[in-house]
């Protein structure tokens, strides 16, 4: 296992890649230039098995170890940016107005490239490493599509690992936990049906706005009164639409929002009870509701054996005290969850220092973190696939 000093040499080069990617952000599946850049770098490291165009612009590249037969593990980075006007004032700020790397995927891509360069040179492991560069993480579909397009079977991947930077965590520190680390993400639309009419005659109408107001509070009661207080359920109403004029009670109102859960039974509970509560309230006043409920990303679930491997790799890099192996899960979601559904694996957080938060216009990935991410990937490969000759 290597200490962080081994990877300092790669820091300068990885920083240059990161700044280039930061200046040239691309969105969702349309990361063509980024993918071309990544594939070009991989080829320049002497990697000759590179498949492009998976899920439109995703890449899987294979590095064979020199230690002989062994399993293949997948390491994943995301490549897409966000539709935000950058306000970081950094010299390498986005050159494309309205697009920026506000989640650090430029850093994630550069760290996996740095690890690829190191691993392609040393190949000090058995089996093989599959480098997975995915598009459209923010859209929540790129990881799912790469799995649906069969990357796990096609490349013989038996375990899969992911990493994300964490603003507010010191550079050089890592955080991970066994089991759920991120939440399942669902979305809902509730159409509240009333009966419109003159605002001066409420008794002759069924006011969907008053029903919507009660439904919104009713949904919060599902959380506070219907859920075990030691379990986590988030229901957030994030959009509310109704009405056209000051003197008209409208026909209907629309309530939209998101549900986050860490456990499958709470996810079922939320879907079932949101309908029951909304229906009960609306029908009690002569109205009705229609619910559209969509289950999107699954729980980001870390498997025990792989969590232990990830923890061991990080500790071998920065020492035991700098790796917290029992961080609290977040109610955010991550499309790496689809890869963790397809194969056992683990997702780890990497300290980004005291930067602005993710998805904030002032955010920037911390270049000081690059060598830690590179070192983690290399130590993970050598830990998991044993050292070759
Ligand atoms: Ni992200």
Image (cartoon, helix red, strand yellow):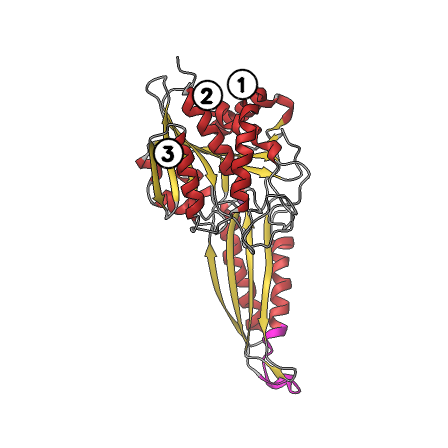
Image location (x, y in percent) of residue 362: 65, 48
Query: Distance from label 3 to label 1 (Cα)?
Result: 24 Å
| Front tag of 2 and 1 | 1
Image location (x, y in percent) of residue 299: 50, 44
- State yes or no: discs 2 and 1 in contact (Cβ < 8 Å): yes
- State yes or no: discs 3 and 2 in contact (Cβ < 8 Å): no
Q: Looking at the image, which residue sits at the far left? A: 154
Residue at image mark 3: 61
Q: Looking at the image, which residue sits at the far right? A: 354
Query: Based on the displayed image, in which of its 4 quarters is residue 195 positioned?
Result: bottom right
User: Which circle's residue, 2 or 1, is located before the other in the chain?
Assistant: 1
| Disc sitting over residue 382 in the figure | 2
In the rendered image of this protein, does residue 188 appear above or below residue 196?
above
- Report if the beta carbon of the residue with label 2 is closer than 8 angstroms to ligand 1: no
User: Which circle's residue, 3 or 1, is located before the other in the chain?
Assistant: 1
Asked whether 225 or 351 is in front, the reply is 351
Secondary structure, mark 1, is loop
In the rendered image of this protein, does residue 163 appear above or below residue 64?
below
Name the residue: 57% across, 35% down.
349
User: Which circle's residue, 3 or 2, is located before the other in the chain?
Assistant: 3
Magenta range = 197-210
> Does any portion of residue 286 appear in the rendered image?
yes
In the rendered image of this protein, does residue 122 appear above or below residue 131?
above
Q: Is residue 200 magenta?
A: yes
Query: Distance from label 3 to label 2 (Cα)?
Result: 18 Å
Residue at image mark 1: 2
In the rendered image of this protein, does residue 118 appear above or below residue 248?
above
């Amino acid at each position: 296992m290597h200490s962080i000093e081994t990877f300092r040499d790669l820091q300068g080069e990885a920083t240059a890649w990161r700044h280039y990617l930061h200046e040239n952000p691309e969105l969702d599946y349309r990361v063509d230039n980024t993918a071309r850049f990544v594939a070009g770098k991989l080829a320049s490291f002497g990697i000759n098995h590179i498949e492009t165009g998976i899920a439109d612009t995703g890449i899987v590249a294979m590095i064979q170890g020199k230690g002989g037969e062994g399993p293949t593990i997948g390491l994943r980075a995301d490549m897409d940016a966000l539709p935000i006007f950058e306000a970081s004032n950094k010299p390498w700020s986005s050159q494309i107005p309205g697009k920026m790397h506000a989640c650090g995927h430029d850093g994630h891509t550069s760290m996996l490239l740095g690890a690829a360069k190191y691993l392609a040179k040393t190949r000090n492991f058995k089996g093989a490493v599959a480098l997975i560069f995915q598009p459209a993480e923010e859209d929540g579909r790129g990881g799912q599509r790469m799995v649906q397009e069969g990357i796990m079977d096609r490349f013989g991947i038996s375990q899969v690992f992911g990493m994300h930077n964490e603003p507010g965590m010191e550079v050089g520190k890592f955080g991970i936990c066994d089991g759920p680390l991120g939440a399942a993400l669902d979305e809902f639309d509730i159409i509240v049906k009333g009966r419109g009419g003159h605002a001066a005659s409420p008794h002759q109408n069924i006011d969907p706005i008053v029903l919507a107001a009660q439904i919104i509070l009713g949904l919060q009661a599902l959380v506070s009164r219907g859920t075990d207080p030691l379990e986590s359920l988030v229901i957030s109403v994030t959009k509310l639409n109704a009405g056209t004029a000051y003197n008209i009670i409208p026909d209907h109102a629309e309530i939209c929002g998101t549900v986050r859960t860490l456990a499958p039974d709470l996810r079922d509970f939320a879907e079932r009870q949101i309908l029951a509560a909304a229906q009960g309230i609306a029908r009690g006043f002569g109205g009705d509701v229609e619910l559209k409920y969509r289950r999107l990303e699954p729980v980001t679930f870390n498997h025990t054996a792989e969590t232990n491997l990830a923890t061991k790799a990080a500790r071998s890099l920065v020492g035991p005290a700098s790796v917290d192996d029992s961080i609290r899960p977040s109610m955010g979601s991550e499309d790496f969850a689809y890869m963790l559904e397809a194969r056992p694996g683990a997702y780890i957080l990497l300290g980004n220092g005291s930067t602005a938060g993710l998805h904030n216009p002032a955010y920037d990935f911390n270049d000081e973190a690059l060598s830690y991410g590179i070192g983690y990937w290399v130590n993970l490969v050598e830990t998991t696939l044993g050292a070759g000759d």
